[in-house]
Amino acid sequence: MERIIEVKNLCMSYERAEVLHDVSFNLSAGEWLSIVGENGSGKTTLLKGIAGLLPVKGGEINFSSGVSRKTIGYLPQQTAIQRDFPACVHEVVLSGCTGSNRILGLHSAGDKKRAHEAIHELGIEEIHHRPYCDLSGGQQQRVLLARAFCATQKLLLLDEPVTGLDPVVSAEMYESIKTLNEKHGVAVIMVSHDIAGAVKYSDKILHIGNGVEFFGTTADYKTSSLGRRFAGD
Ligand code: ADP
């Protein structure tokens, strides 16, 4: 499989405090990588570094096989402001189409088609005219996933996509991500607290704590001492 991202000896910090030190991993087309680790270990910082939203202090993040920062779909951690976003579902999804030419906020026919496909694929047709702020947490996450999918055919970055959702809604969200991953071949890098979900769905695991504690296949993670401690047998 073609390599799409290679991270080498990455270091990131806020002011003087180093958050990530010497982090290396890679991902190939169509793979699903989960980044797990304690609170404060730097998972969100790492995802923002990959998305180009935060500068890196050392090391490299190299994209290949047609992937670039312009063609990544990003689902950020939800904030209270986002939850109150004053727009309808269709507009929120369409706002993910950032790669094509837009003049004065007008979207091309191609963008509208892509948004329509994303709405269909995520099963949110019935709510596409509703105000985003009136939706449940699970529906909002599904809309944000459709928005991120609009932006990419290659790589989705998902920050805590199921946090705050009940088990049934979480499972539905995971299945939607799986559809985008398996049916559409979109690679996924997901930050999660939910190690059981990460182990169930991903191909690879990056466990960070004091540096990289594990990087490899999910099968190897499950039999590692770290995996046995966190994911159980
Ligand atoms: P995680 O996602 O693993 O919980 P984060 O990447 O959010 O970890 O945070 C890693 C560390 O960086 C934490 O110690 C956090 O307090 C610190 N941090 C996060 N954001 C900022 C910021 N904007 N300014 C300064 N420190 C930050």
Image (tube, rainbow, N blue to C red):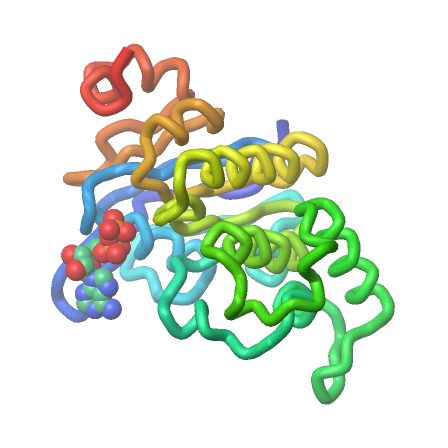
Q: Quadrant of the N terminus?
A: top right
Q: Position of residue 67 (x, y in %)?
A: 62, 50
Q: Is residue 75 left or right of residue 1?
A: left
Q: Residue at x 51, y 53 (%)?
A: 141
Report the label total.
0
Q: Is residue 54 above or below residue 203?
A: below
Outermost right residue: 109
Q: Residue at x 13, y 67 (%)?
A: 16
> In this orientation, does residue 27 appear?
yes
Q: Position of residue 135 (x, y in %)?
A: 53, 61
Q: Position of residue 134 (x, y in %)?
A: 53, 67
Q: Is residue 182 left or right of residue 43?
A: right
Q: Quadrant of the C terminus?
A: top left
Q: Nearer the viewer, residue 53 or 8?
A: 53
Outermost bottom residue: 104
Q: Residue at x 44, y 59 (%)?
A: 76
